[in-house]
Image (cartoon, rainbow, N blue to C red):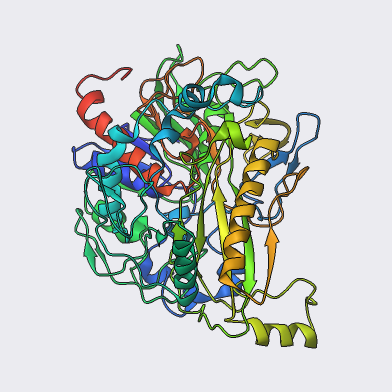
């Protein structure tokens, strides 16, 4: 059986951060809205209640809040010549599942990209010359500027109750903040989190070396906060269960703690769970969307949901998958360079050095997801690309996010994986180790992209999404540059021993170890339909009533965690829908 439901003004695909923001902003306008979430419903109570939610085996190791590959996955290969294989066991990245999405299980690092990251190709060509860009690198400008987005970053930070110390306010550099951040109109809504002994030691040493340490901006509330929707956050109790967990204390910013209960009060907003959108339906001429078709798991039937506006607010790779399945934009062809949908997938280049101290105690079990001190002295705007031979940048951070007994234990290289010697090493080093890490950019390339797999299908018979991606020399040179800087700082911190882990020359992408859930691109924003899938307002070039929200919009990956930019862009787009599109539906560019 199949059914057709009553037409809505807006249908939203996914109910994580972007879906929740779009939902509440459009609900305030009186629009009839339906959000479709393929996973289960989740609320702070009862889903994140203590002590159930701090089960490390269930959530930290067995990924209780993540998508199940047997229900939803993709295939992965490293080159055009390889046969892609299904991502059968979660490892490299962990898409969220259910209401709240990845906004449930993130750590809370909330950044603003540097100003030149939005106009990266232009910046490189103007500053270092076009020859500085490798032939196969396909970096682009975003089509929007830091100045235009500033009010929307501010709004997201105040809605989410971000803790931090501003570095540049109205052109004035503020002591103790990040002097390399883009200009902001005011300070963070909450003061920084309390710092741990290891991050304070790092900050002291970095300051002595001439660097500029500052508290890492955090979506972990340092004090009580009430946002514009009347949602209340309580101060973080530093329990150390952030990444991979829901917050039991109403302290970590999430759709649940910041938006959803306020959104559910609107009678013109409804949402359905266990409802997986299969495709966006297009009019006969392909110029507009008419709604979506989804699978209702409870009724076990396909449902056609007509709507005037379709907003794709799923996880980044799932947005791209739906666009490819629905014929939104021309699929990208890496051999010809034509097409845009699937183009410019990129990831994150990270590395780190672990230090062991015999006589320093760090108490890692007292931690918040984004506690720690950072430096941005080697950011995207601080490096001479021509001299160093790479395009990119990184921030560096020291501090614990947890001291959990399974994932929070570091032991020196060469320690057995089990047995008496392992137990002895754990006893000697638990609480006496810390790390200094690099969180770096990843550029986009001609042969790193997303398309439909020709072999494998999902439970609905649709082709799986296929990811083609590998590490490139440019980004490996960047992380090796960061390694040199980090190891200089590490030596000055005087640990008794230390060990490093960075991508080396010739490194290939390995999907088994966790890296980041920062998958970006594939439905990139830009200034032309010939080079981007969506315009500067995240509106599809070919279907004016389709908007695509999330990190799928990034033309290449920034040096920071993406959530701050994702949230700001969601507010930017919904503002454009309310003030430009609704009065006069049509292309906004």
Q: Quadrant of residue 515?
A: bottom right
Please state the horizontal and vertical placement of residue 507, each as a whole percent of the image.
76, 45
Please state the horizontal and vertical placement of residue 354, each as a whole percent of the image.
63, 67
Horizontal relation, residue 307 to residue 137: left or right = left
Horizontal relation, residue 406 to residue 569: left or right = right
Residue 398 visible in the current orientation: yes
Point 71% across, 51% down: residue: 88
As drawn, the residue found furthest toward the top would be 285
Q: How many marks?
A: 0
Q: Quadrant of residue 428?
A: bottom right
Along the viewing direction, whichever of 491 and 183 lies nearer the viewer: 491
Along the viewing direction, whichever of 207 and 500 lies nearer the viewer: 207
Please state the horizontal and vertical placement of residue 349, each as a whole percent of the image.
61, 47
Image quadrant in which the C terminus is located: top left
Please state the horizontal and vertical placement of residue 180, each as a whole percent of the image.
38, 46
Along the viewing direction, whichever of 241 and 378 lies nearer the viewer: 378
Q: Is residue 231 above or below residue 278?
A: below
Residue 264 visible in the current orientation: no
Horizontal relation, residue 343 to residue 167: left or right = right
Q: Is residue 190 above or below residue 442?
A: below
């Amino acid at each position: 059986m199949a059914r057709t439901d009553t037409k809505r003004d807006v249908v939203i695909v996914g109910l994580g951060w972007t879906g929740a923001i779009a939902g509440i902003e459009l609900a305030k306008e009186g629009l009839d809205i339906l959000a479709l979430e393929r996973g289960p419903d989740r609320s702070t109570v009862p889903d994140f209640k203590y002590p159930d939610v701090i089960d490390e085996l269930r959530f930290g190791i067995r990924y209780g809040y993540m998508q199940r590959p047997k229900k939803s996955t993709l295939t992965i290969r490293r080159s055009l010549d390889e046969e892609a294989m299904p991502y059968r066991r979660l490892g490299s990245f962990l898409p969220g599942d259910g209401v709240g999405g990845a906004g449930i299980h993130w750590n809370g690092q909330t950044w603003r990209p540097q100003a030149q990251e939005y106009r990266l190709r232009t910046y490189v060509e103007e500053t270092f010359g076009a020859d500085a860009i490798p032939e196969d690198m396909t970096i682009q400008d975003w089509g929007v500027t830091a100045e235009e987005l500033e009010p929307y970053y501010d709004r997201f930070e105040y809605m989410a109750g971000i803790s931090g110390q501003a570095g540049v306010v109205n052109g004035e550099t503020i002591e103790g903040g990040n002097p390399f951040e883009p200009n902001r109109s005011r300070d963070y809504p909450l003061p920084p989190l309390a710092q741990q002994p290891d991050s304070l030691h790092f900050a002291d040493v970095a300051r002595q070396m001439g660097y500029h340490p500052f508290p890492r901006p955090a979506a972990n509330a340092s004090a009580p906060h009430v946002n514009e929707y009347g949602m209340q956050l309580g101060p973080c109790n530093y329990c150390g269960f952030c990444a991979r967990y829901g917050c039991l204390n109403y302290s970590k910013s999430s759709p649940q703690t910041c938006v959803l209960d306020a959104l559910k009060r609107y009678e013109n907003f409804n949402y359905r769970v266990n409802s997986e959108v299969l495709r966006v339906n297009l009019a006969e001429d392909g110029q507009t969307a008419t709604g979506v078709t989804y699978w209702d798991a409870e009724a076990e039937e396909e449902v056609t949901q007509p709507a005037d506006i379709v907003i794709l607010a799923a996880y980044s790779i799932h947005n791209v998958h739906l666009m490819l399945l629905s014929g939104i934009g021309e699929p990208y062809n890496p051999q010809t360079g034509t097409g845009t949908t699937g183009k410019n997938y990129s990831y994150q280049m990270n590395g780190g050095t672990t230090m062991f101290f015999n006589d320093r105690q760090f108490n890692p079990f007292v931690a918040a997801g984004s506690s720690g001190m950072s430096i941005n002295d080697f950011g995207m705007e601080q490096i001479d690309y021509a001299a160093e031979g790479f395009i990119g940048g990184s921030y560096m951070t020291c501090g614990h996010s947890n001291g959990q007994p399974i994932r929070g234990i570091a032991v020196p290289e060469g320690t057995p994986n089990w047995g008496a010697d392992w137990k002895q090493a754990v006893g000697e080093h638990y609480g006496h180790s810390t790390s200094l890490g690099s969180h770096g950019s990843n550029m986009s390339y001609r042969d790193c992209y997303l398309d439909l797999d020709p072999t494998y299908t999902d439970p609905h018979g649709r082709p799986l999404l296929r990811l083609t991606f590998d590490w490139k020399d440019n980004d490996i040179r960047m992380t090796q540059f960061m390694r040199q800087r980090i190891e200089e700082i590490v030596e000055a911190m005087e640990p008794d021993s230390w060990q490093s882990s960075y991508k080396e020359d010739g490194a290939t992408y390995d999907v088994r170890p966790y890296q980041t859930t920062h998958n970006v691109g594939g439905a990139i924003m830009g200034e032309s339909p010939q080079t981007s899938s969506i315009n500067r307002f995240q509106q599809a070039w070919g279907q004016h009533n389709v908007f695509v929200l999330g990190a799928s919009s990034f033309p290449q990956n920034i040096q920071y965690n993406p959530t701050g930019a994702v949230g700001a862009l969601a507010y930017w787009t919904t503002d454009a829908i309310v003030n430009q599109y609704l009065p006069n539906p049509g292309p906004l560019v």
